[in-house]
Image (cartoon, grey):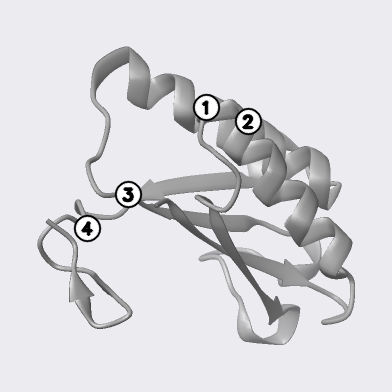
């Protein structure tokens, strides 16, 4: 069930097309060892004019990408680290960004608080 929300700071909001999003979904599904249709990806762009870092001009910073992963259960230990590394590499590669500018966050577990088609996940 992973839902991958990606927010990429961009000069142009049309920088990425549907083929890019599909490539990310397919690669994450393979890396997380999930069946087809089990990974959902949403890509949002954020104009450079709506982003800032303290003490710097926006033009001086590389365009960051923020990734949020929602899973039924959050893996732990080495499994979590493996997923973070995989997600970072996949997103960086597919979006043409450097890995050090991709920042991954795991949301609290979705089990018992997410509903799909009106049915609570248990």
Which of pointers 4 and 3 lies earlier in the amino acid sequence?
Answer: 3
Q: CA distance from mark 1 to mark 3?
A: 13 Å
Residue 5, above or below 25: below
Q: CA distance from mark 4 to mark 1?
A: 19 Å
- The circle on residue 110 is 4
Q: Which residue is mark 1?
A: 33
Where is residue 42 shown, x and y percent of the image? 59, 69
Q: Quadrant of the C terminus?
A: bottom left
Where is residue 57 shown, x and y percent of the image? 71, 69
Who's the residue at 47% across and 32% down the image?
Answer: 84
What is the quadrant of residue 18 in the picture?
A: bottom right
Dot 1 lies on which element?
loop
Label 2 Cα neighbours within 10 Å, binned few <14 / some 14-19 / many ≥20: some
Q: Is disc 4 in contact with disc 3, using a CB cutoff of under 8 Å?
A: yes
Which of pointers 4 and 1 lies earlier in the amino acid sequence?
Answer: 1
Comparing marks 1 and 3, which lies closer to the viewer? 1
Which of pointers 3 and 2 lies earlier in the amino acid sequence?
Answer: 2
């Amino acid at each position: 069930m992973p839902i991958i929300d990606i927010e990429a700071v961009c000069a142009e909001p049309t920088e990425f097309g549907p083929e890019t999003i599909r490539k990310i979904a397919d690669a994450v599904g393979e890396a997380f060892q999930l069946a087809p249709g089990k990974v959902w990806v949403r890509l949002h762009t954020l104009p450079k004019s709506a982003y800032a870092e303290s003490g710097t001009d926006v033009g001086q910073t590389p365009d960051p990408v923020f990734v949020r992963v929602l899973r039924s259960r959050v893996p732990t230990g080495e499994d979590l680290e493996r997923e973070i590394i995989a997600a970072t590499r996949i997103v960086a590669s597919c979006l043409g960004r450097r890995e050090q500018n991709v920042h991954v966050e795991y949301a609290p577990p979705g089990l018992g608080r997410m509903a799909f088609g009106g049915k609570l996940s248990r």
